[in-house]
Amino acid sequence: MDHRVGRIVFALFIGLLVALFSYQWITDPAGRAERKLQEYVVEVARGQLKDAIGMEMLEIVDPLSPNRKVGKVYVFPEGDAWAVSGYYRRAADDRWHPYLMALSADLSVTSLKIQDKNQQLIERAALDPQLEVSP
């Protein structure tokens, strides 16, 4: 009988502890602020990518619109700078092209690496030291 009471008290204690930590984690404003900052960085990266590709209408898979079938994506702080990865394609019949973008603290592009066979992008990469295009 004593074991049964001990188990019930232990289970209630653990349940209360988990509920308390869950509540603190959910209501923590720092997590929401970090998420808002990450969303802003990804939105800026989308615009930078569209400018670099030279097309306004791109289908983009990134941390705000992930698609596990296409591949893994991330937004990652690197000190004051950021790194954003993802995939894009120009049309539904185009294949997905992976990209990795490094942004400075003021969210300007420091480097953009793309896998694409588009000749215009390859020519633009020859003139732009921040852009690297590999077939």
Image: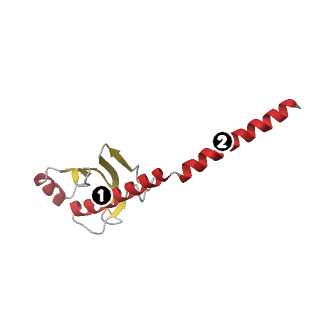
In front of the other: 118 or 82: 82
Amino acid type assigned to the residue bearing label 1 in the image: Ala
Q: Is residue 10 above or below residue 99?
A: above
Residue name at image x 33 percent, y 51 percent: 84
Helix, strand, or loop for circle 2?
helix
Amino acid carrying label 2: it is Leu
Q: CA distance from mark 2 to mark 1?
A: 40 Å
Residue reaching furthest to the left: 127
Query: Which residue ends up furthest to the top in the rendered image?
Result: 2
Residue 11, x across and y down, in percent = 74, 39
Which residue is disc 2 drawn over? 17
Residue 135 in view: no
Q: Quadrant of the N terminus?
A: top right
The quarter of the picture where residue 91 lies is bottom left
The location of residue 89, given as percent across then percent down, is 32, 61
**Residue 78, image x and y in percent?**
31, 43
| Residue 80 visible, this orientation | yes
Q: What's the mark number on residue 45?
A: 1
User: Which badge, 2 or 1, comes first in the chain's sequence?
Assistant: 2
Residue in the picture at 14% in, 57% down = 124
